[in-house]
Image (tube, rainbow, N blue to C red):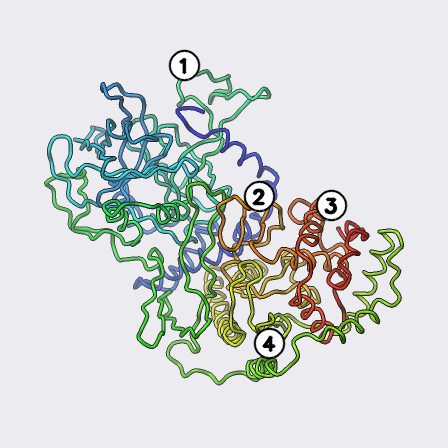
C-alpha cells in the first residue's frame, strides 16, 4: 500500500472484471443503457424524471438529460459551472500532522453537515492523528493564478469521530472556528444521498480534489464509470494520491462516491510503472505513478454504515443532519473566499431537487401513507401488511449492501386525479380464488401419493445418471400440457404459493403477506408500469433514438420495475421466453426489495454465511447470492429447470457451472421438502400438468446427471 491506500484490493476488483469490461464495450456500442443493470437504469431514469418534473423547464430538457446518459450530447446548461463552484467550496485539503507539527502527507475531504467532515480512513484512521491534523478550505487560485487567502480549521475527534476501515471512510467534527479565531458558523455542505440511481456505468463523473496536496483542482467530465460493485465504483480519471477523500459527482452535482484508491499500471513482473513507462520506485513520488483506473466508495453504502453506527446522544445529534438528507439553505453557503469570510453570498444551492431527498412517508390517522416520487402515491396497509420501506447499507464489517426492507412500490389506483377504474375481471377472479382457498383442503397426502405413484410409473430409477436425467427430462416436458403465461397475480398467489396458514411468504426473507394484499398491489403496479413505459416512450422518442434501440431500452425499463414474484432462474438467462417465464415450478412470492437485491446473479454458498453480517434477504457479493431463507425450495426449483429446459442455463460463471450443482444438491439435502412444497407441487400439477421430481423423490437427486442440462 502507498500511504495506506488499499491498492491491492482495488486492483483485485479491477482485474476480476476484465472480461466483463470487454463485453460491456461491445454492448455500449449498440445501447449505452444496457451497460448497467436494469434496476439501476430505472432508478437513474426515475431520478432524472423527478428532477425535471420539479423544474419549470421544457419537456425537451428530459430528453437532453437522457441524451447525456446515452453519450450523445455534451451540451450543458451554463448554471452547471455555477453549481459546481458552490460544490467546490465544501472541499478542503487535509494536512496530516504529528504532534510536533511534522507534516506526514496530504489528502482531500469535504463537509457533509454543518460540523462534520469526511475523508478516507487511510488518511485519518485514528482519532489521535485527526486531533493534530488540519483542514484548509479555499486553498485555490483565483482567475489571475494567485493563491487566495485560505481558511485553516482544526479537527475535534472528541466531539465526533467515526471510522470504517472496510468502507475506507472517516468522519470527524470540525472546530467551530478557524485557527485564526474566525467563527465559521453553519457553512455550505454537500448532502449524502442514500438512495441509489445517481449514476450508471459509462456515465461521466466529476472530481474536485487537492492532488498531491496542491491547490484545488477539478477533473470535469473526463472520468467515465467503468464498474459498479456492491460497495465501490471504478472510473478512469487523472486523480493523484493526494486526492484520497475527494468527492465524486454526477452531472447533477450529487455526490456519488468518496474517492479512495487507484489501480496502477504494472509490468510483467508486477512492478508499478511511471507515466513514461519506466519502473516506479518510492523515491520518485506517488504523482509519477501511471494510474489506469481509480475507485471510490459508494455514498449509499457510507450512509448505511453511518445510520447503523451506535453513537452517544451528543454524537447522534451531530449525525442527524446527514441522515435527514437535506441540503443546507442558501444564507449559510460560504462565499468564494471560503468559510468565515465577511463577503455575503446571496445565491444558494438552487431549487431543491426532489430526487436527492430520501422518500419520506406522511402517515395519516387512518393509516394511509403518502409519498411524493414525484407522483403523489398513497397506500393503506392492512393487518399483516407489507413492511415499511427502510433504507439500509453495509455496516463496518459487511461485504455486501444491506437491501431495503421488503416492500413493493405502492402505486396509485388512478393517475392525474382521474376516478379510480373498476377492478378488472382478472383481479376480481384472483380475489375470488383466494376466498375459495379458505374452504379447500390444503394438502391431501394420500391423494397426492397416489398421483405421484402414477406419474412416475414408467421411470426406472436404477439406471445410469445420464439415462435417469433423460427419462425425467422427457417426462416433465411431455406432461407440461398447459403452458401458462406469466401472471403470478392469477396463477401463483391465490393458491399455489400459499403456506399452511394461507399466507404468502417471501422466498428469501420469509416475511409473511396476505394474498389479497399482494394481488391488489400487483394489479396497481401493472397499471402504473404500463403508464410509466408509455411516458418513457415519449422521452426516448424526443431523444431521437433508433427504433430498435428505443424498444430495447423500453424492454429493459419494463423488466426492472418492481416485481413481487421471483424467477428462481432469472428471466434474462432465457430471454423472458415462454413457457419458461410462466412455469410455476420456479416462481415464488418475493417482495421487490429482495427481488432487486438478488438481481440476476447465481446462487452461491458463502463459507462464512452464518457468521457474516448480512441483510434479511441474504448475502450478495460480486458473482454470488446466498438467500437467508428458502434454500431447499430454490435449489429444487433450479434442478427442475435443468430437467425441464436443457441448455437454457449456459454453464458459465455468469450462470451455473457443473460445480455449482453440488451447492444446489447440498441445499436440497440439508432442507428436505416441506408440506408447503408438497402442496405447491400438487397444485402446479393440477394447473400445468407436470411435477417436480426432486420434491416427489428427494432420494433420486444424487443419481441424476444434472450437468447434462447445462448449455
Residue 369, image quadrant:
bottom left
Q: CA distance from mark 2 to mark 1?
A: 37 Å
Nearest to viewer (mark 4 / mark 2) = 4
Q: Residue 108's x, y, as percent?
A: 31, 33
Q: Residue 122's x, y, as percent?
A: 38, 30
Which residue is denoted by mark 1 in the rendering? 283
Q: Residue at x 51, y 20 (%)?
A: 277
Nearest to viewer (mark 3 / mark 2) = 3
Residue 143 seen in the current view: no
Residue extending farthest to the front is 446
Q: CA distance from mark 3 to mark 4?
A: 36 Å
Q: Is residue 234 left or right of residue 127?
A: right
Q: CA distance from mark 1 to mark 4?
A: 71 Å
Circle 1 sits in a helix, a strand or a loop, which is it? Answer: helix
Residue 103 seen in the current view: yes
Q: Of residues 514 and 192, which is closer to you in this image?
A: 514
Which residue is denoted by mark 4 in the rendering? 494
Amino acid at each position: 500500500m502507498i500511504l495506506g491506500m488499499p491498492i491491492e484490493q482495488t486492483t483485485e476488483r479491477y482485474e476480476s472484471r476484465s472480461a466483463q469490461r470487454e463485453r460491456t464495450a461491445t454492448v455500449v456500442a449498440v445501447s449505452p443503457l444496457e451497460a448497467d443493470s436494469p434496476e439501476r437504469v430505472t432508478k437513474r431514469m426515475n431520478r432524472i424524471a423527478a428532477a425535471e418534473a420539479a423544474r419549470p423547464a421544457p419537456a425537451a430538457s428530459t430528453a437532453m438529460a437522457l441524451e447525456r446518459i446515452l453519450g450523445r450530447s455534451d451540451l450543458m446548461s451554463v448554471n452547471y459551472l455555477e453549481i459546481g463552484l458552490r460544490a467546490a467550496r465544501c472541499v478542503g485539503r487535509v494536512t496530516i500532522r504529528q504532534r510536533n507539527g511534522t507534516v506526514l502527507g496530504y489528502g482531500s475531504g469535504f463537509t457533509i453537515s454543518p460540523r462534520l467532515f469526511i475523508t478516507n480512513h487511510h488518511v485519518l484512521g485514528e482519532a489521535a492523528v485527526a486531533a493534530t491534523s488540519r483542514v484548509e478550505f479555499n486553498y485555490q487560485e483565483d482567475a489571475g493564478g494567485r493563491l487566495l487567502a485560505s481558511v485553516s480549521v482544526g479537527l475535534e475527534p472528541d466531539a465526533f469521530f467515526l471510522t470504517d476501515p472496510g468502507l475506507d471512510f472517516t468522519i470527524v467534527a470540525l472546530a467551530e472556528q478557524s485557527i485564526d479565531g474566525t467563527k465559521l458558523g453553519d457553512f455550505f455542505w454537500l448532502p449524502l444521498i442514500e438512495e441509489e440511481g445517481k449514476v450508471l456505468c459509462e456515465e461521466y463523473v466529476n472530481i474536485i480534489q487537492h492532488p498531491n496536496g496542491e491547490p484545488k483542482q477539478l477533473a470535469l467530465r473526463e472520468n467515465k464509470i467503468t464498474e459498479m460493485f456492491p460497495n465501490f465504483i471504478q472510473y478512469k480519471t487523472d486523480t493523484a494520491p493526494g486526492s484520497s477523500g475527494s468527492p465524486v459527482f454526477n452531472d447533477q452535482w450529487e455526490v456519488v462516491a468518496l474517492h479512495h484508491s487507484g489501480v496502477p499500471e504494472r509490468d510483467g513482473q508486477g512492478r508499478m510503472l511511471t507515466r513514461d513507462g519506466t519502473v516506479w520506485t518510492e523515491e520518485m513520488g506517488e504523482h509519477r505513478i501511471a494510474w489506469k483506473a481509480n475507485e471510490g466508495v459508494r455514498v449509499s453504502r457510507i450512509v448505511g454504515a453511518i445510520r447503523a453506527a451506535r453513537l452517544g446522544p451528543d454524537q447522534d445529534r451531530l449525525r442527524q443532519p446527514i441522515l435527514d438528507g437535506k441540503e443546507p439553505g442558501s444564507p449559510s453557503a460560504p462565499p468564494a473566499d471560503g468559510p468565515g469570510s465577511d463577503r455575503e453570498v446571496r445565491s444558494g444551492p438552487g431549487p431543491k431537487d426532489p430526487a436527492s431527498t430520501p422518500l419520506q412517508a406522511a402517515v395519516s390517522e387512518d393509516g394511509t401513507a403518502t409519498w411524493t416520487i414525484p407522483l403523489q402515491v398513497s397506500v393503506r396497509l392492512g393487518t399483516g401488511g407489507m413492511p415499511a420501506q427502510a433504507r439500509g447499507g453495509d455496516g463496518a464489517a459487511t461485504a455486501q449492501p444491506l437491501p431495503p426492507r421488503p416492500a413493493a412500490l405502492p402505486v396509485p389506483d388512478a393517475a392525474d386525479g382521474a376516478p379510480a377504474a373498476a377492478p378488472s375481471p382478472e383481479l376480481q377472479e384472483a380475489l375470488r380464488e383466494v376466498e375459495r382457498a379458505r374452504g379447500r383442503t390444503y394438502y391431501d397426502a394420500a391423494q397426492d401419493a397416489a398421483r405421484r405413484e402414477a406419474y412416475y410409473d414408467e421411470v426406472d430409477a436404477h439406471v445410469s445418471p445420464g439415462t435417469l436425467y433423460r427419462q425425467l427430462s422427457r417426462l416433465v416436458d411431455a406432461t407440461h400440457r398447459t403452458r401458462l403465461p406469466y401472471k403470478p397475480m392469477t396463477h401463483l398467489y391465490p393458491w399455489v404459493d400459499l403456506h399452511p396458514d394461507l399466507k404468502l411468504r417471501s422466498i428469501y426473507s420469509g416475511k409473511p403477506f396476505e394474498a389479497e394484499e399482494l394481488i391488489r398491489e400487483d394489479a396497481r403496479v401493472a397499471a402504473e408500469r404500463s403508464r410509466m413505459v408509455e411516458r418513457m416512450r415519449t422521452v426516448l422518442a424526443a431523444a431521437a433514438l433508433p427504433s430498435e434501440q428505443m424498444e430495447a431500452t423500453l424492454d429493459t425499463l419494463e423488466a426492472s420495475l418492481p416485481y413481487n414474484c421471483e424467477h428462481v432462474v432469472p428471466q434474462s438467462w432465457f430471454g423472458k421466453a415462454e413457457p419458461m417465464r410462466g412455469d410455476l415450478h420456479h416462481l415464488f412470492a418475493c417482495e421487490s426489495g429482495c427481488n432487486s437485491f438478488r438481481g440476476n446473479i447465481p446462487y452461491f454458498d458463502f463459507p462464512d454465511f452464518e457468521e457474516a453480517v448480512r441483510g434479511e434477504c441474504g448475502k450478495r457479493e460480486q458473482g454470488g447470492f446466498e438467500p437467508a431463507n428458502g434454500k431447499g425450495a430454490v435449489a429444487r426449483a433450479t434442478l427442475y429447470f435443468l430437467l425441464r429446459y436443457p441448455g437454457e442455463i449456459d454453464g458459465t460463471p455468469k450462470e451455473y457451472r457443473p460445480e455449482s450443482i453440488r451447492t444446489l444438491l447440498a441445499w436440497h439435502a440439508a432442507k428436505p421438502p416441506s408440506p408447503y412444497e408438497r402442496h405447491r407441487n400438487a397444485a402446479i400439477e393440477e394447473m400445468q400438468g407436470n411435477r417436480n421430481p426432486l420434491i416427489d423423490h428427494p432420494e433420486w437427486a444424487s443419481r441424476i446427471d444434472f450437468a447434462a442440462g447445462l448449455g
